[in-house]
Amino acid sequence: MTEKKAILLGSDHAAVDLKAIVMAHLKSRGLDTEDMGTHGRDSVDYTHYGIQVARAVSEGRAERGILLCGSGLGMSMVANRFPGVRAALCNDLFAAGMCRRHNDANILVLGGRVLGDVLACAIVDAWLDTPFEGGRHQVRLDQFNQGFCEPFK
């Protein structure tokens, strides 16, 4: 029997309210979650929370994570610096499905000042429910993991 790993969530102050809504939504789906912080609206550096979640995914201590900050941009940049992390900033359902289908995204990034509650939860559902297609897309992921991509010709 494999151990069920929690989905890790981290946010800065700008997205702490949306994080709480997303966590409640995940729990309503019967999923385990772990809140890596922050827990209040006082200004914090998003990097601290992004690093915690991305490192856990990179090291295999978590299979998936969700990061939130004001725009989602900063968290995306932090998370994608870690080996094996494929963080995708998604502001719509198409991107949420495609980042899983073609890129096997293991961290979803949301902008707390960009998305409303209903759309954010729908994006989370699309990200969770869309499988990775593999095949030709796996070749590209292997290139990510080897640290190179074919040069432009």
Image (cartoon, rainbow, N blue to C red):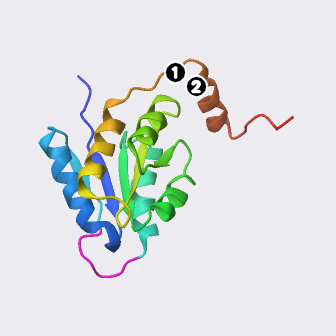
Q: Is residue 3 left or right of residue 89?
A: left
Q: What's the magenta region?
A: 38-44
The residue to which callout 1 is attached is 134
Residue drawn where x is 29% and y is 65% of the image: 37
Residue in the image at 61% along x and 36% along y: 145
25 over 46 or under it: above or below: above
In which quadrant of the rendered view does residue 71 lie? bottom left
- Give the structural element (helix, strand or loop) at label 1: loop
Magenta stretch, main secondary structure, is loop
- Residue type at the position of mark 1: Gly
Q: Dot 1: few (<14), some (14–19), or many (≥20) neighbours within 10 Å?
A: some
Label pair 1/2, CB-CB below 8 angstroms: yes
125 or 66: nearer the eye? 125
Label 2 packing within 10 angstroms: few (<14), some (14-19), many (20+): some
Label 2 sits on residue: 137
Query: Outermost residue, bottom direction?
Result: 42
In percent of width and height, residue 140 lies at: 63, 30
Q: Could you give the CA–CA distance between mark 1 and mark 2, rounded to whole angstroms?
A: 5 Å
Q: Residue at x 26, y 43 (%)?
A: 6
Residue 117: x, y in percent? 24, 56
Across and down, in percent, residue 151 comes to: 82, 37
